[in-house]
Image (cartoon, helix red, strand yellow):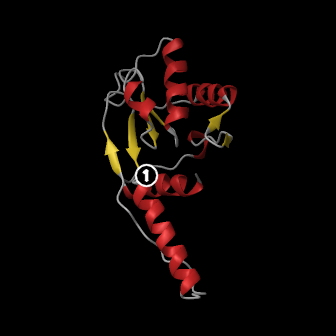
C-alpha cells in the first residue's frame, strides 16, 4: 500500500496539485479485510475537512465499496456530490451501485514476472538486487467518478 501511496503523491505533484497530509488517511488492512469502523471514521474525518474533498480514492476496491455505501447512507449522491475510486478491479467493483471506477493491475503478468525473477535468482545464483519491472495498469472508468456539483 505504501508504494501505491507514493505513486499517488507523485501523481499529484506531477499535475501541480498540492499534497495535503490531512487528506491522506490510513486504515488497517489485514489479508483483504478492512475494519468498517475505521473506514467510517476515515470518511467522517475527510468530510469534516474544509474544503471537503470532491473525491475519495481508496487503495482497495473493498474499502471503496464500503466508503461509497456509507456516503450513500448519509445522503450523498455518487458521483454528483463526491467521486469514489478504488484499486484492484475486484469483481464486486463492477456490480456495486454505482459501478466503481478502479485501477486494474495485471495480476497474472505480475505473478509470472515474479516467478521468472525468482527462478533467475535461484538457478543463476544471482546475488544482484532484484530487477525493477514495470507493468502497465489500466484505468477502468465506470460510474463512481464525475464532476462534482459544487
Kindly identify which residue carries mark 1. 12
Residue 40: x and y in percent read: 63, 25
Of 67 and 111, the residue lying toward us: 111
Give the percent coordinates (x, y) of residue 4: 51, 53
Instruction: Name the residue at the front extreme.
Output: 123
Q: Residue at x 44, y 53 (%)?
A: 107
Residue lying at 43% horizontally and 70% vertically, measured from the top left:
133
**1 displayed left or right of 17:** right
Residue 136, by quadrant, is: bottom left
**Image x and y of residue 61, in percent:** 49, 36
Quick check: can you spot residue 142? yes
Write the residue at 69% across / 40% down: 28
Q: Where's the C terminus, which quadrant?
A: top left
Residue 79 vs 131, above or below: the answer is above
Residue 119 against residue 76 in the figure, above or below:
below
Residue closer to the observer: 22 or 59: 59
Q: Is residue 41 left or right of residue 87?
A: right
Question: Relative to the observer, which residue lies in front, 110 or 15?
Answer: 110
Residue at the image position 42 percent from the left and 56 percent from the top: 108
Where residue 56 sits: x, y (%)? 48, 34
Amino acid at each position: 500500500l505504501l508504494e501505491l501511496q507514493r505513486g499517488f503523491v507523485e501523481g499529484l505533484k506531477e499535475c501541480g496539485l498540492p499534497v495535503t497530509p490531512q487528506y491522506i488517511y490510513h486504515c488497517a488492512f489485514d489479508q483483504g479485510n478492512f475494519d468498517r469502523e475505521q473506514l467510517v471514521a476515515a470518511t467522517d474525518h475527510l468530510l469534516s475537512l474544509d474544503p471537503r474533498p470532491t473525491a475519495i480514492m481508496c487503495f482497495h476496491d473493498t474499502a471503496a465499496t464500503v466508503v461509497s455505501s456509507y456516503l450513500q447512507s448519509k445522503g450523498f449522491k455518487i458521483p454528483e456530490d463526491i467521486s469514489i475510486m478504488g484499486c484492484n478491479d475486484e469483481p464486486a467493483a463492477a456490480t456495486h451501485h454505482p459501478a466503481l471506477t478502479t485501477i486494474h493491475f495485471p495480476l497474472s503478468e505480475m505473478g509470472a514476472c515474479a516467478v521468472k525473477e525468482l527462478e533467475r535468482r535461484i538457478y543463476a545464483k544471482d546475488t544482484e538486487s532484484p530487477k525493477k519491472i514495470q507493468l502497465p495498469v489500466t484505468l477502468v472508468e465506470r460510474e463512481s467518478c464525475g464532476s462534482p456539483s459544487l
